[in-house]
Image (cartoon, rainbow, N blue to C red):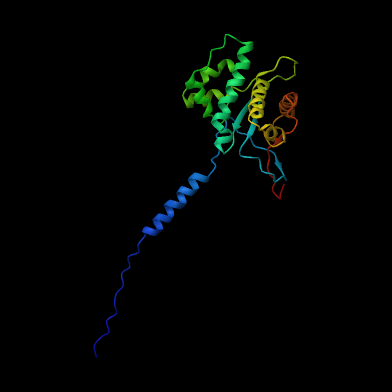
Amino acid sequence: MGKVKIKKHSTHIDMTAMSDVTVLLLTFFMLTSTFLQKEPVQVITPPSVSTEVVPSEKLVQVLVGPDGKVYMNLTGARDSSVLSSENFRLEVLHRAYNLYREKNPSAPKLTVAEETEFTKLNTFGVPMKDLAHWLDQPMEKRDEELKTGGIPIAMSIKDGQPNEFQIWLRAIKEVMQERGLGKDLTNGRGVAIKAGQYSPYHLVQVVMDNLQTEKLNKFTLMTSLKSEEE
C-alpha cells in the first residue's frame, strides 16, 4: 500500500501588514507624547494626596531650587491661533526687557537671533544684564551657566522698585490680559510653584510674597502623589 503524501504548506508569513501597524503606532506616540523638560536643578517635590493635574498649557511655572535660585518656564496654548508657546515667550520677552531697559538704558538691545533663541527655551533664569550674552552661548555652555544663575528676586518687597522676578510677572500679566487670557492666569491654575520638599520654607515664601505683590493671589504648589506607605 502506498504512502499518503501530505501537502506541505509554506511557513512564510507576510509581515507587511504588521510593519505598517508598527509604523503607524510609532508615529502616533511620537506626535502625542509629552517629553520631560530639562531643568537646571533637580527638585524632588513633596508628596501629597492631591490628584489634581497641573495644566499642560497656558501655564507659568516657577522653579525654586534648594539654594533659593528662581527659574521660570512659560507654556502657551496648544492652539497656536490663540497664543503659541513661541509667541508667548517672545511677547513676554519684549515687555520684560523693555521694562528693564527703562531703568537701565545702557543695557544692549537684543538681536533677532537672540530673541529667536529665547522662544525655544523650556526654562530660563539669568539676570537681565547677562541675558544677551547668555543667549549667544552654545546650548551646553548655556546649561552650565543656568545652574549658577537664577532670576534676581528681593527678599523684601520695595514699593515702586520691582525686582526682576516682578518685572517678568508684570510682562506675563500684560500679555495674557491683552490676549483675553487673564482669567487663565488668575484662576489658581495658571501659575504653579515647583519647589523641593526639603527646600527652606522662607525661600518659597519669598516667591509667594512676590506673586501676591503682583496680585497673583492664587497659584498651585506642585507635588508628587503620596504612596500608601507614606
Considering depth in this image, is 8 or 55 the residue closer to the camera? 55
Q: Is residue 24 left or right of residue 71?
A: left
Give me the residue at 55% from left, 19% from top.
Answer: 131
Q: Is residue 207 above or below residue 224?
A: above
Image-quadrant location for residue 108 = top right
Viewer-nearest residue: 149 or 120: 120
Q: At 31% across and 72% down in the image, what residue appears?
A: 9
Tell me where residue 215 appears, x and y as whole percent: 74, 26
Given residues 157 and 180, the one toward you in this image is: 180
Q: Is residue 68 visible?
A: no
In-image side of 111 versus 14 (left or right) = right
Is residue 33 toward the left or the right of residue 173 in the image? Answer: left
Furthest toward the left, the residue is 2
> What quarter of the picture does the N terminus occupy?
bottom left
Where residue 181 sits: x, y (%)?
A: 66, 33
Can residue 21 be seen at all in this image of the molecule? yes
User: In the rendered image, which quarter is residue 105 located in?
Assistant: top right
Residue 34, image x, y percentages: 55, 42
Across the whole image, how many numbered discs are drawn on residues? 0
Residue 73 vertical position relative to residue 94 in the rendered view, above or below = below
- Above or below 159: residue 62: below
The picture places residue 24, in percent across and down from the top left corner, at 44, 52
Residue sticking out furthest to the bottom? 1
Please, which residue is most extreme toward the top here? 106
Residue at position x 61%, y 21% in the image: 95
